[in-house]
Every structure is written in structure tokens, then in C-alpha cells.
Image (cartoon, rainbow, N blue to C red):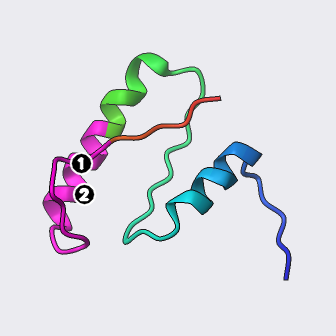
Amino acid sequence: MEYDTAFRPYLAKRIEQIGSADIVVGIPCYNNDATIVNVLTQVSHELAKHYKSARPRTSRPKVSAIFS
């Protein structure tokens, strides 16, 4: 079955590369490059704090963002 999506092609490809994840967080943003890194960092830290058993980590959380 095929589904329509609002994802841009590069985002759909990146999601396929990731394969699987314990938790997925979507943060819509537009023209806020100056603040989005801080938002992503805080979300990453809070997820690591509150969901310690979601997936073992060997290093600090990695923040990855895709900007258009």
C-alpha cells in the first residue's frame, strides 16, 4: 500500500536511512535558525533524562537537524 506524505524527498530518504528508533520527535520550524539548535539540544537532554531505558547510549545524545 502506498501513502501520500508531506515529507520532502530528502527527509523521507533520511528517515529510511535511520531505519528504526525507540522515540521519534518532530519539531516543526520555519526561519528560526538562531534558536532551533537550543530547542533540539533541550529536547535531546530531556529525552535522555526521562527515557533512560529507551536505548542504551555509549556517548552523549547527538542532535541532528535537517534544514531546507
- Residue 23 magenta: no
| Residue 47 image offset from top left, x and y in percent | 25, 57
Whether residue 57 appears in magenta in the rendering, the answer is: yes
Residue at image coords 17%, 64%: 50
**Viewer-side label of 2, 1:** 1
Work out whether residue 27 or residue 65 is closer to the camera in this orientation and state it: 65
Which residue: 30% across, 47% down?
43
Q: Which residue is mark 2?
A: 47
Between the C-alphas of marks 2 and 1, the distance is 9 Å
Decide if residue 34 is on the left or right side of residue 62: right
Task: Tell me if residue 36 comes above or below residue 20 in the rendering.
Answer: above
- At x 14%, y 58%, the residue is 49
Element on which disc 1 rests: loop
Vertical comparison of 17 with 67: above or below: below
Which range of residues does the magenta coloring cover? Answer: 41-62
Using residue 68 as the reference point, say whether residue 18 is left or right of it: left
| Nearer to the camera, 17 or 38 | 17
